[in-house]
Image: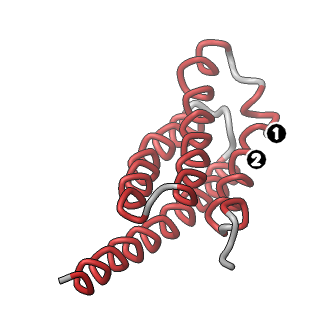
Amino acid sequence: MGLVWYEFPVYRDTHDFYMELARNKSIESVPKDVRINIVEPLKKWVFDILVNIYRLYYDPLERRPAHIQDCLDLIPPIRVSLRMLCDMKLINPEQFIALSKQAESIQAQLKTMLGSAVGKIERKAERKS
């Protein structure tokens, strides 16, 4: 039997990324307006990626590319939010680089998964015809 949803490397990496955001003292101590406008949406976007990865496991193959694309669509606002936190000097450049690398890794894994899912759908369609 294959991996369970919480064993997917992309899930583990996204979970670690979320926990890093949740535990980061610099991020937690930002002013209220920044927390409401940048930090809380940032955490929600990362959490939404986790939920979509969960859905990948349970939804039919044909719906998987949509969930993966939903995840990929969340990466740019995540990256912009991290950049804003760094530009506002609320996280240091080292934290920004580390968090950005995590986001890039998640994005690369999702792109690979998207290609794989689309390929499986195409092969399945070819077998039917």
The residue to which callout 1 is attached is 23
- Residue at 42 percent of width and 65 percent of height: 61
Q: Secondary structure at mark 2?
A: helix
Split into 4 quadrants, where in the image is the N terminus? bottom right
User: In the image as oriented, which residue stretches furthest toward the bottom?
Assistant: 127
The residue to which callout 2 is attached is 20
| Near-viewer residue (6 or 72) | 6
Picture quadrant of residue 30: top right
Picture quadrant of residue 33: top right
| Near-viewer residue (50 or 23) | 50
Q: Secondary structure at mark 1?
A: helix
Residue 46 horizontal side relative to residue 64, left or right: right
Type of the residue with mark 2? Glu
| Near-viewer residue (82 or 113) | 113
- Within-10-Å neighbours for mark 2: few <14, some 14–19, many 20+: some
Marks 2 and 1, how far apart in space? Answer: 5 Å
Split into 4 quadrants, where in the image is the C terminus? bottom left
Residue 81 horizontal side relative to residue 127, left or right: right
User: In the image as oriented, which residue stretches furthest toward the left?
Assistant: 129
Percent position of residue 74, x then y = 45, 45
Residue 5 horizontal side relative to residue 63, left or right: right
The reply to whether the C-beta atoms of the residues labelled 2 and 1 are less than 8 Å apart is yes
- Residue at 24 percent of width and 81 percent of height: 128
| Colour setup of the view | secondary structure
- Residue at 55 percent of width and 40 percent of height: 48
Tally of marks: 2
Tag shown at residue 44: none
- Residue at 66 percent of width and 77 percent of height: 2
Type of the residue with mark 1? Arg
Percent position of residue 82, x then y = 56, 42
Percent position of residue 126, x then y = 22, 84
From the viewer's perspective, is residue 73 above or below residue 129? above
